[in-house]
Amino acid sequence: MPMPLNQLLPAAESAVLIRELTLDSRKVRPGDLFLAVPGTQQDGRVHIADAVARGAAAVAYEAEGAAPMHAETAVLVPVKGLAGQLSAIAGRFYGEPSRGLHLVGITGTNGKTSVSQLLAQALDLLGQRCGIVGTLGNGFHGALEQGKHTTPDPVGVQATLAGLKQAGARAVAMEVSSHGLDQGRVAALEFDVAVFTNLSRDHLDYHGDMQAYGAAKAKLFAWPNLRCRVINLDDAFGQELAQQVHDSRLIGYSLSDANAFVYCSEAQFDDHGVRARLVTPRGEGMLRSNLLGRFNLSNLLAVVGALLGMDYGLDEILQVLPQLQGPAGRMQRLGGGDRPLVVVDYAHTPDALEKVLEAMRPHVRGRLI
């Protein structure tokens, strides 16, 4: 629904109606608000004339370092620190969609995609329709539309959440990348639960060093009004993260730490998958899953922790876990039982292939080829 410009931007005097928001001048249609910010590769302000020519009703642009400009057919609004306000501006335009959703943010070097997919399936089975925002696309499980980034731009994030909510989502499992946190793409979202999977060397071309990389991830766990932090205590950085003081409830999960909120006291792997005993303050029970690999067991513990943090009972959680399927191409199983077990994985480096073979060894009685 169109919104007056001065409701979107406090700095604006005009009440011209805004039809849609965009950061891409090529996508501007008549009545849109073009948001022109300097980027890492190019400065959006150089495309203001193009946006106006395409019919933009208004342009908000970064005031710092901007040359004087004028437009006959569009309202121009200079805004200091515009990039940091994009998430809030988009939130206002799309009706603050995260406020009406149980929003779970999942971050970590590895496991984000699997945990988000597994959690969404579990919530669907528990009667709470769950959307997905992440690497494999945005939408609902089994019907994802491919996105450009793990975490979309600030406008895209809010628009996606609004669309999922309108389509019936009551919860959303969102992969939150370190880039997304560092660049403020999710700055105005209201997360209920934050999940940490692990931290290993990655994206150092962007962050510079592991300390900066970890600090970007840690932002999610100091989020205002966060209800629950779900953290992998088998990871060294996860242990540090769990020590940080926050008002939210801490749910640690572990395959080795008996003091963790969700502790796997024993596990048996075979070609059917895994059977594991879970010990929690909410009771004990057997986890059964056809997923393969110790790391997938850790991913399942993250899902259990998130669901416990959302106040589901352990028994009802354990009932749905056997039905969960991993993402296609991620330790995807074919056969098994009285047939050879074949596993398809998109591992495309020697290190990744080695990890897949190591993960498969406990499941295999005979030769591993």
Image: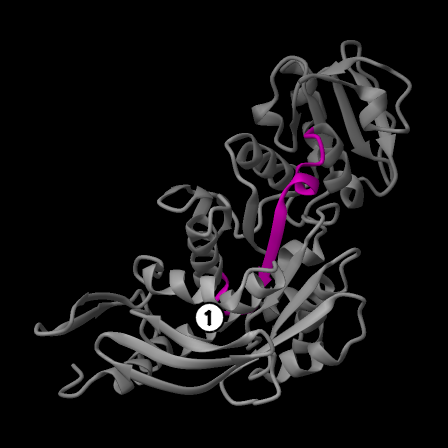
- Which quadrant of the structure image shows residue 238? bottom right
- Taking depth in this image into account, of 56 and 369 the one nearest to the observer is 369
- The amino acid type of the residue labelled 1 equals Asn
Q: Is residue 202 above or below residue 14?
A: below
Few, some or many C-alpha atoms within 10 Å of disc 1 (few <14, some 14-19, many ≥20)? many
Residue 126 relative to residue 166: left or right:
left
Give the residue number, with chain letter if any, for mark 1. 299
Q: How is the image coloured?
A: one colour
Residue occupying the point 32% across, 70% down: 291
Q: Is residue 318 magenta?
A: no
Kindly give the residue lying farthest to the left in the view shown.
Answer: 338
For the question of whether residue 148 can be seen, the reply is: no
Quadrant into which the C terminus falls: bottom left
In the picture, which quadrant includes the N terminus?
top right
SS class, disc 1: helix
**Number of numbered discs overlaid on the protein picture:** 1
Highlighted range, magenta = 94-112
- Residue 225, quarter of picture: bottom right
Q: Position of residue 2 (x, y in %)?
A: 70, 16
Image-quadrant location for residue 11: top right
Judge from the rendering whether residue 18 lies leftward or rightward of residue 319; answer left or right. right
**Residue at 14%, 87% in the rendered image:** 367
Q: Nearer the viewer, residue 324 or 78?
A: 324
- Decide if residue 198 is in sight here: yes
Measuring from the top left, give residue 122's x and y in whole percent: 44, 56
* 55, above or below 103, in the image: above
Q: Nearer the viewer, residue 247 or 155?
A: 247
Q: Position of residue 215 (x, y in %)?
A: 72, 70
- Left or right of 110, for residue 341: left
